[in-house]
């Protein structure tokens, strides 16, 4: 990998996104709008929002980053841009790292907006540090970016990229412990949930929600989410194709 090439790739992606206001709105505003909607769905019982708001604060950015990243990367390949880039002295690792850096910077902004909105405008009540909440939200967004980059290698059209959401995101959403504690699921489903990164993202948010200090479980959850993002990015670089057949 070459640092200068990675930075150049990230700068190119950010320039493209700057001229695409709809994508920026999807990335930065949709998680905030969904949190506001959720808060007023439970208008008469704010304790319910306190119970699930922190978990969804991590899930919403993951989903939006997955969707946008997978489609944006696929568009590069189908338009021939990716083939031209890889014909230059630009390695797959440089390309993937550049995309991850560009979308990672957007993930920082997205996570900060959503976390600030939830805590200071929607009244989300957490016992732990808001900075830890922001950390998990950021790692979740980066995980969504990594997953989007990875699955784009297996899609031939943008429609197919969207179809990966039910296969990759929805099972994690159902098994992450948001709807019912994971230890109350069928044993096979509980075992499956133990290897899904979104489960640890939700657990990390719940640790901040309930504990005033840093816990060993929180550190474990953060490391699992971060490690999963790095692993998926490596797989994305290994499976990246120059063009869509």
Image (cartoon, helix red, strand yellow):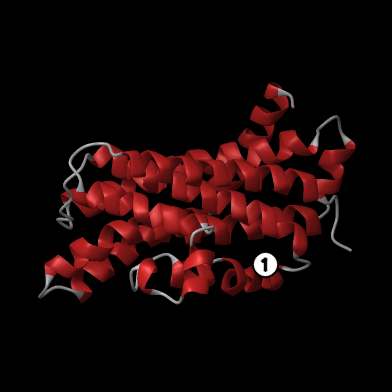
Q: Position of residue 103 (x, y in %)?
A: 55, 44
Task: Say what secondary structure mark 1 lies in.
Answer: helix
Q: Residue at x 51, y 41 (%)?
A: 226
Q: Nearer the viewer, residue 191 or 138?
A: 191
Direction from residue 204 to residue 150 in the image, left or right? right
Q: Nearer the viewer, residue 51 or 19?
A: 51
Q: Position of residue 219 (x, y in %)?
A: 38, 38
Q: Quadrant of residue 179?
A: bottom left
Q: Position of residue 98 (x, y in %)?
A: 65, 36
Q: Does any portion of residue 136 appear in the rendered image?
A: yes
Q: Position of residue 50 (x, y in %)?
A: 19, 61
Mark 1, Cα crowd under 10 Å, few <14 / some 14-19 / many 20+, is many
Q: Residue at x 34, y 43 (%)?
A: 218
Q: Residue at x 58, y 36 (%)?
A: 101
Direction from residue 60 to residue 66 in the image, left or right? right
Quick one: which residue is furthest to the left in this view?
A: 44
In the rendered view, tell whether residue 72 sits above or below residue 238.
below
Q: Nearer the viewer, residue 55 or 26?
A: 55
Q: Quadrant of the C terminus?
A: bottom right
Direction from residue 36 to residue 165 in the image, left or right? right
Q: Quadrant of residue 122?
A: bottom left
Q: Circle 1 is placed at which residue position? A: 161
């Amino acid at each position: 990998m070459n640092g200068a090439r990675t930075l150049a790739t990230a700068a190119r992606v950010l320039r493209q996104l700057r001229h695409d206001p709809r994508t920026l709105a999807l990335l930065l505003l949709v998680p905030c709008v969904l949190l506001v909607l959720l808060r007023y769905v439970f208008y008469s019982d704010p304790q319910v929002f306190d119970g699930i708001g922190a978990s969804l604060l991590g899930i919403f950015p993951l989903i939006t980053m997955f969707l946008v990243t997978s489609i944006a990367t696929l568009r590069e390949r189908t338009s021939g841009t990716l083939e031209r880039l890889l014909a230059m002295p630009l390695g797959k690792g440089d390309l993937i790292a550049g995309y991850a850096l560009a979308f990672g910077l957007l993930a920082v902004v997205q996570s900060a907006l959503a976390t600030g909105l939830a805590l200071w405008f929607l009244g989300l009540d957490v016992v732990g540090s808001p900075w830890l909440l922001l950390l998990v939200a950021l790692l979740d967004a980066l995980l969504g970016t990594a997953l989007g980059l990875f699955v784009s290698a297996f899609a031939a059209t943008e429609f197919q990229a969207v179809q990966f959401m039910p296969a990759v995101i929805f099972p994690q959403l159902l098994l992450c412990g948001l709807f019912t504690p994971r230890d109350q699921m069928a044993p096979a489903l509980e075992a499956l949930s133990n290897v899904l990164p979104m489960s640890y993202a939700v657990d990390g948010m719940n640790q901040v929600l309930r504990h005033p200090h840093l816990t060993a479980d929180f550190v474990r959850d953060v490391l699992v989410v971060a490690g999963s993002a790095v692993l998926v990015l490596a797989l994305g670089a290994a499976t990246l194709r120059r063009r869509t057949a």
